[in-house]
Amino acid sequence: MPLIPTTPTPNEIHQLQLDQLDAFLRESELILEAWNIYSDEHTDLDGWPHDDDAYGRRAAQRDADTANAFEAVREQVHQLLATAEIQLASLPARAVQNRWVWQLGTLRDALDRLDALHDEGHQALDGLPADARPGTEFFDDALAIHHAEAWSSLDDWATHGHVIRDIHAAARHAPSALAPAPTTTAASVPGRHSPARR
């Protein structure tokens, strides 16, 4: 029997977005762990690289991998952050952890920087010579610079992104009047069919 497409509810869409965020958090943690192992093995006791060029290339790979992992959730993070802010404002004080406001502010600032860098990156790549394509020095250098500039903001999301899940869990356990449903639209998750409930 063929699967009949259905329109996901806002709660189902929000759960899919949370799952995508979780995937980014897991992947970014693995990327950072691999980087830390490499860095420990390729620096002296004072933290200076044994080979500056190799170390720089490996750092560029870390930056690119983290940026690529974030691309899978980029379209969702604005809505996730907005929903978390609404949920946090609706929670009773006893259910709120002090760090949540600061963490959401850190995520908001990081997202603002990432949005600005995203626009600047497109403009920089558009301004390259016509023959600059992926794999060419001009293109790859410009992309590496963009990734390096974005990495600290991406690391903020990797470090503090779990607060969105923490606030969501608190909102689910709060009285229903204090836990507004997500306001996402089905259009924000194209091509999804009958997602499983959690």
Image (cartoon, rainbow, N blue to C red):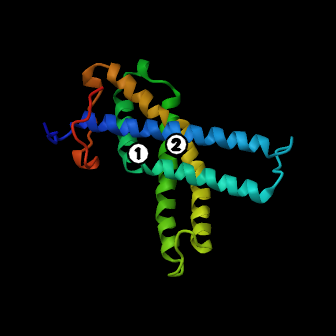
Percent of width and height locating residue 67: 53, 52
Of helix, strand and loop, which one carries label 1?
A: helix
Picture disc at residue 138 = none
Percent of width and height locating residue 149: 60, 58
Q: Nearer the viewer, residue 187 or 30?
A: 30
Q: Is residue 62 above or below residue 126?
A: above
Which quadrant of the figure has residue 54?
bottom right
Picture disc at residue 77 = 1
Percent of width and height locating residue 44: 85, 44
Q: Nearer the viewer, residue 122 or 168?
A: 122
Callout 1 crowding tier (Cα within 10 Å): few <14, some 14–19, many ≥20: many
* Residue type at the position of mark 2: Trp
Q: Answer with mark 2 or mark 1, whichever residue precedes in sequence.
A: 1
* Residue type at the position of mark 1: Val
Q: Looking at this rendering, what residue extends furthest in the front direction?
A: 1
Q: Quadrant of the N terminus?
A: top left
Which quadrant of the figure has residue 11?
top left
Residue at the spot of label 2 = 157
Rounded to the nearest whole Å, what is the CA distance between mark 2 and mark 1? 10 Å
